């Protein structure tokens, strides 16, 4: 079973504005591919592409890049990006990709595969990948951290309060954490040449309001906002005020360092005998 999320226009716009583009993951992915297959890389398909932050990062390395998503609102936002000429988008489910069998060099899914019908997606990815092609799945944990002067520990206690308040609104389909979902997919992938990376810590300098905006794009916050908009606003304002008080600042535009913890796995489809 697949789960549809992130389909409202307002949420899609926030997703584009606040989600972090995964440059470091792309670097690791391309390095892996260069070890496994010869250039030039022809075709990449980024599945569950959302508003395209990761999709466009693939453009320098492939002749053609397609981003796919089931959400028209997300694809509408993707088209507002400054998309390179070799990037285009298609609306489709992750389990029914409109590409010929055995012609794709890379199938990627960045912070999306946990929503898919996972066995069907893996089967479909295998169908469209060419022998020697790469499958790359990435996400990050919810427990992002903040760094600011000598109050980082205090800030992270407040962040944990935020995450704990949102946890009851987490979709049961995801379980308590997303990592086991990806590890299960990794284990079930039959390709013998594969690697799992538990944690890639990435730091970004963002205004405090950017951190708050990123958490507010999480599905758990979106559920709270739909069920009780006043409580969602109260919680966000409360956490923001506590963070600013700890930082001894009055502006949410004050810059902090946000630490995002990625995990991912990469696999290479065996060459034909």
Image (tube, grey):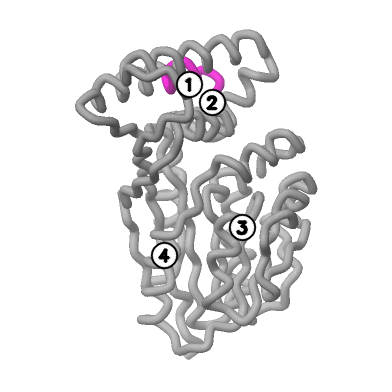
| Residue to which mark 4 is pinned | 266
| Residue to which mark 2 is pinned | 170
Disc nearest the viewer among 1 and 3: 1
Q: Mark 4 to mark 2: distance in Å?
A: 27 Å
Q: Is residue 156 left or right of residue 237?
A: left
Question: Do the numbered discs 2 and 1 sit on residues whose CB atoms are within 8 Å?
Answer: yes
Q: Dot 4 lies on which element?
A: strand
Label 3 CA crowd tier, 10 Å (few <14, some 14–19, many 20+)? some
From the viewer's side, name the closer residue of 89 and 198.
Answer: 89
Q: Which numbered circle lies on residue 36? A: none
Mark 4 or mark 3: name the one nearer the start of the chain.
3
Residue 43, image quadrant: bottom right
Q: Farthest left residue?
A: 150
Q: Within the magenta stretch, is there residue 151?
A: no
Q: Is residue 171 visible?
A: no
Q: Mark 2 to mark 1: distance in Å?
A: 5 Å
Q: Which numbered circle lies on residue 121? A: 3
Label 2 CA crowd tier, 10 Å (few <14, some 14–19, many 20+)? some
Quadrant position of the N terminus in the picture: top right
Q: Within the magenta stretch, is there residue 164?
A: yes
Mark 4 or mark 2: name the one nearer the start of the chain.
2
Mark 1 or mark 3: name the one nearer the start of the chain.
3
Q: Mark 3 to mark 2: distance in Å?
A: 23 Å
Image coordinates of residue 158 in percent, x first then y, are 35, 18
């Amino acid at each position: 079973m697949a789960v549809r999320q992130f389909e409202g226009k307002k949420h899609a716009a926030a997703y584009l504005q606040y989600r972090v583009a995964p440059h470091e993951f792309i670097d690791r992915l391309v390095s892996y591919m260069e070890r496994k297959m010869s250039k030039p890389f022809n075709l990449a398909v980024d599945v569950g592409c959302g508003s395209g932050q990761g999709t466009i990062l693939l453009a320098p390395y492939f002749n053609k890049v397609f981003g796919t998503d089931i959400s028209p609102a997300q694809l509408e936002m993707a088209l507002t990006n400054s998309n390179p000429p070799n990037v285009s988008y298609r609306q489709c489910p992750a389990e029914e990709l409109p590409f010929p069998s055995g012609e794709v060099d890379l199938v990627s899914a960045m912070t999306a595969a946990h929503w898919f019908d996972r066995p069907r997606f893996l089967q479909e990815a295998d169908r469209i990948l060419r022998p020697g092609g790469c499958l790359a799945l990435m996400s990050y944990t919810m427990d992002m951290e903040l760094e600011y002067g000598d109050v980082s520990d205090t800030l992270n206690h407040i962040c944990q309060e935020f995450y704990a308040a949102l946890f009851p609104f987490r979709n049961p389909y995801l379980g308590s954490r997303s990592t086991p979902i990806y590890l299960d997919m990794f284990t079930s992938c039959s390709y013998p040449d594969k690697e799992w990376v538990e944690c890639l810590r990435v730091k970004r300098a963002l205004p405090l309001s950017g951190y708050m905006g990123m958490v507010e794009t999480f599905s758990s916050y979106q559920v709270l906002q739909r069920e009780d908009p006043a409580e969602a606003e109260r919680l966000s304002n409360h956490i923001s005020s506590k963070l600013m008080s700890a930082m001894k600042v009055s502006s949410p535009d004050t810059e902090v360092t946000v630490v995002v913890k990625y995990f991912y796995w990469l696999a290479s489809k065996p060459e034909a005998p």
